[in-house]
């Protein structure tokens, strides 16, 4: 592909804070994919499989149908596969479509972040796996190249999250404005200057307000990262052609400094890659809901059997979680206490517990028929009392534990504690657990043979010269 000449930039700009974007570009290109630890590459494969499973499971959701319709109406053909369809499109639209497909059920991976020994909401770094898949496919990169880009993307994602003010006005998907062009630019083999400008252009379009995940949560929750990722891919493509961006965007007061105020951004982003890189801290979800609700759902399902499903006899439900400020906010956010949308319901502890306690299961079916408005479910939600207990902080460090206790009308009590939910990883995701989840969530969409072919293609991906064998299994 012919490239436009790269415009010269003012060397004096270094004094205005361009170093972070340029230093990060240099760091990204310095990581040798052939030398990555085997456990990190294996983890990347399992997370890729998990993301693909989530995409197949979510394809019939209304917001996915809307996004796919927009992609089809645009009429852009291209080399990139949209998972579960016959559509082919360009890389940016593939990042959008597959990003929404993988994210919509809130079933993709999560990371427990941390600052000063206290867990924090770490987000969903797999939101940007569709970027790696799209660019890997259209540029003919090897499976190993794609997996290495995923590992690098996870690391940048985690580092940027530590620099954010979690209580501030910006949502965590803002980090993907840097992560997406980093993944794309590495796979496109941009030189250091072009990659720095790709990061700058992506960062300039990244800032996403926190309201997408607070209060009356809308469908924007499901598409926020995909929109940022789409823009990040476009940024890399533009930079490849010589388009420049504001290189000081990461640290300048007129850029994203207020989004990333915690620490020296350049030093944090360019620290040596540790043996236990950020990707090893990821967990897979068992249930389609927020990460902090996984233990709550597991506890409620356990109680369902204990009470024989007799929820009508319950007088009171006490829910106790770790004593962290973000959990207190989530417990009492009015938009979650009484959800009015699918997106708010999967972030509502009250709904999750009421539905799981009633049904003894929790999956996409529990949202059907606007279940959060069902009078029986609402009545059960109103009997829930939310609490926090500092004792949980020490008993289950680095986790989002939960205890659920029910008291019936006769005064009988039953309780279940879940310190670490299903899918929680302390040293690497178990392959059998990831594969079992994939089969479970895709069984309604794919026959057994197709599922086995996808699993085999993902597990062998690091030995493939291109992404073609894998992407061929993903199309309709």
Image: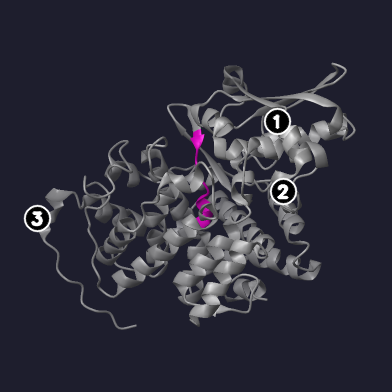
Position of residue 344 measured from the top left corner of the image (x, y, whole percent): 59, 45
Q: Which residue is mark 1?
A: 382
Position of residue 388 measured from the top left corner of the image (x, y, whole percent): 59, 22
Judge left or right: residue 124 versus residue 366. left
Instruction: Residue lying at the far left in this picture: please name it.
Output: 12
State the extent of the magenta-drawn residues as a range. 120-127
Instruction: Residue lying at the far right in this picture: please name it.
Output: 308
The residue under the point 21% across, 51% down is: 19
Q: CA distance from mark 1 to mark 2?
A: 35 Å
* Front disc: 1 or 2: 1
Q: Earlier in the sequence, mark 3 or mark 2?
A: 3
Element under disc 1: loop
Question: Cβ–Cβ below 8 Å for labels 1 and 2?
Answer: no
Is residue 116 visible in the rendered structure shown here?
Answer: yes
**Quadrant location of residue 305?**
top right
Q: Earlier in the sequence, mark 3 or mark 1?
A: 3
Q: Which residue is mark 2?
A: 433
Judge left or right: residue 155 versus residue 25. right
**Quadrant location of residue 86?**
bottom right
Is residue 360 visible in the rendered structure shown here?
Answer: no
Q: Residues within 10 Å of mark 1 (few under 14, many from 20)?
A: some
Relative depth, front residue between 338 and 475: 338
């Amino acid at each position: 592909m012919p490239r436009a000449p790269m415009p010269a930039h003012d060397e004096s700009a270094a004094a205005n804070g361009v170093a972070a974007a340029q230093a990060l570009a240099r760091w990204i290109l310095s990581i040798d994919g052939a030398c990555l630890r085997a456990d990190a590459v294996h983890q990347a494969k399992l997370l890729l499989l998990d993301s693909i499973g989530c995409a197949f499971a979510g394809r019939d959701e209304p917001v996915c149908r809307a996004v796919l319709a927009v992609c089809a109406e645009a009429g852009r053909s291209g080399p990139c596969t949209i998972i579960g369809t016959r559509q082919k499109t360009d890389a940016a639209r593939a990042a959008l479509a597959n990003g929404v497909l993988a994210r919509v059920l809130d079933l993709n991976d999560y990371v427990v972040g941390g600052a000063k020994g206290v867990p924090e909401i770490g987000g969903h770094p797999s939101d940007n796996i569709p970027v790696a898949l799209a660019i890997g496919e259209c540029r003919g990169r090897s499976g190993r190249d794609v997996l290495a880009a995923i590992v690098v993307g996870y690391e940048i994602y985690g580092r940027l999250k530590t620099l954010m003010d979690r209580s501030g006005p910006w949502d965590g998907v803002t980090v993907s404005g840097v992560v997406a062009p980093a993944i794309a630019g590495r796979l496109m083999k941009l030189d250091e200057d072009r990659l720095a400008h790709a990061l700058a252009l992506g960062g300039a379009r990244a800032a996403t307000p926190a309201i997408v995940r607070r209060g009356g949560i809308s469908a924007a929750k499901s598409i926020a990262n995909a929109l940022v990722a789409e823009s990040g891919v476009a940024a890399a493509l533009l930079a490849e052609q010589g388009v420049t961006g504001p290189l000081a965007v990461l640290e300048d007061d007129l850029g994203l400094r207020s989004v990333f105020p915690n620490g020296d951004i350049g030093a944090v982003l360019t620290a040596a890659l540790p043996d236990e890189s950020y990707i090893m801290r990821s967990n897979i979800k068992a249930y389609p809901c927020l990460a902090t609700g996984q233990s709550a759902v597991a506890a409620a399902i356990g109680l369902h059997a204990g009470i024989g499903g007799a929820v009508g006899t319950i007088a009171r439900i006490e829910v106790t979680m770790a004593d962290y400020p973000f959990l207190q906010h989530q417990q009492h956010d009015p938009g979650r206490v009484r959800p009015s949308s699918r997106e708010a319901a999967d972030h509502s502890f009250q709904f999750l517990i009421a539905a799981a306690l009633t049904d003894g299961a929790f999956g996409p079916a529990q949202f059907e028929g606007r279940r959060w408005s069902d009078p029986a479910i609402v009545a059960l939600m109103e009997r829930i009392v939310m609490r926090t207990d500092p004792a949980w902080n020490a008993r289950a460090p680095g986790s989002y534990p939960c205890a659920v206790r029910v008291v019936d009308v006769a005064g009988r009590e039953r309780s279940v504690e879940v310190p670490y939910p299903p899918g929680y990883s302390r040293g690497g995701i178990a392959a059998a657990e990831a594969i079992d989840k994939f089969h479970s969530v895709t069984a309604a969409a794919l026959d057994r043979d197709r599922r086995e072919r996808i699993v085999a293609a993902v597990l062998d991906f690091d030995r493939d010269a291109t992404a073609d064998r894998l992407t061929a299994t993903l199309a309709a």
